[in-house]
Amino acid sequence: MNLIIRRSIENQILKDLSTKIIILSGPRQCGKTTLSKSLFTSYDYLNYDSSEDRLKLLKKQWDRKLKMVIFDEIHKMKKWKSWLKGIYDKEGVTPHIMVTGSAKMNLFKKAGDSLAGRHFNFRLYPFDLKELNLKFKYHHLSEQEIFNRLMRVGGFPEPFLNGDPKFYNRWRKSHIDLILRQDLIDLGSVRDINALETLILLLSERVGTPISYASLAKDLERDPKTIKAWLNVLENLYVIFKITPFHKDIARSIKKEPKYYFYDNGLVRGHDGAKLENIVACSLLKEVHRLEDVEGFNTSLYYLKAKGGKEIDFLVLTENERPWLIEVKWGERDLSPNFKIFQSHFKNPHRIQLVYELEKDYMTQDGHEIRRAIPWLSSFNLVP
């Protein structure tokens, strides 16, 4: 299916390019270069991984008569921010400047942010139901068919558009190999790739459950500090993301057992409920970061946990808006009793239970919403 999908952050990027350097980060092969090249027909593209392009970058040789220049993977250049600052201060954004990278840019803030006031950050993630729904309803894919593909092959553009599970299995192997055998070399922080592959496998079977560093350390015969460092590396490489339990004391929240989810839903192993929860987690994270990057909101994503193991899957906090308490179920239609444990801690929260196997939406007398998962994920809005 040869189709360019217009991304949800694209319009704001176009507006900001006239005054700021745009830094676009996100997982490998999630569409950063495709998005960048689709903005204008007139652009120059230089990739720091190419020895030929690297020389041009060092000599600052690109066609300044074109509409835009794209710098890919330049965070691997020493003092890349100072280099960009010099270009911006001397030439401005003529042509427009787009910077893309597959590792989290906060890895490279060791010497402070010399680009302060000169750039805007955007994060691009794989497709989700909300982004795809309007794009595909005229291309013979229903909401249900989109959801089925996300469950089978995840939301990365190439395997999603292909739709074939066999293609996805081959793509997934090469994708993980590229991350672990190239990006890890750039970071220079992990040498035991086989152990890291095993860690990914263990996490793929524990999606949606609080993770004990000590338990993983025992399984992998390593110490907990090493496991924690490896998990941090996988986060920085956009393989997984972490959601911590909410606590008013942020330091205490960080120390408690987190949950880990995968940007690639196809990596999740186990029952359909875990895959659905991972899809919801990705959708919420993507929308939370869109609200930050595009709208300028302060937002946070957590889960809720009380003594005795009682949980609510997700809590979304957005400044000046009602909190969202969201529980995810595959087939359980009855309202989770756990809402009663947590709802009194928040002022007038939205209380949503998403259920895949639900024929009709309904609301309880006291305001709990039980919603069909697919329609809600296709059109939800955290800031009404």
Image: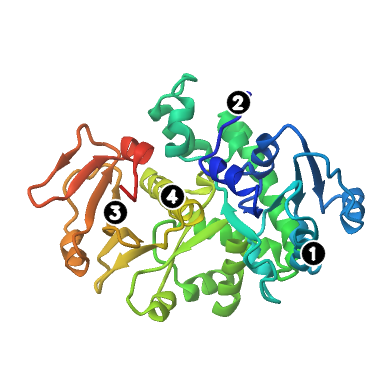
Residue 52: numbered disc? none
User: Depth-wise, is mark 2 or mark 3 nearer the camera?
Assistant: 2
Q: Is residue 272 above or below residue 56?
A: above
Judging by the rendered image, the residue that carries numbered circle 3 is 326
Q: Residues within 10 Å of mark 2 (few under 14, many from 20)?
A: few
Q: Nearer the viewer, residue 365 or 53?
A: 53
Q: Which amino acid is tagged 1?
A: Gly
Q: Nearer the viewer, residue 338 or 135?
A: 135
Q: Quadrant of residue 306?
A: bottom left
User: Depth-wise, is mark 3 or mark 1 nearer the camera?
Assistant: 1
Q: Which amino acid is tagged 3?
A: Ile
Q: Which amino acid is tagged 2?
A: Leu
Judging by the rendered image, the residue that carries numbered circle 1 is 86
Judging by the rendered image, the residue that carries numbered circle 4 is 287
Give the alpha-carbon distance from disc 3 to disc 1, as whole Å: 46 Å
Q: Is residue 124 above or below residue 252?
A: above
Judging by the rendered image, the residue that carries numbered circle 2 is 3
Q: Nearer the viewer, residue 133 or 142?
A: 133
Which label's residue is closer to the chain start, 3 or 4? 4
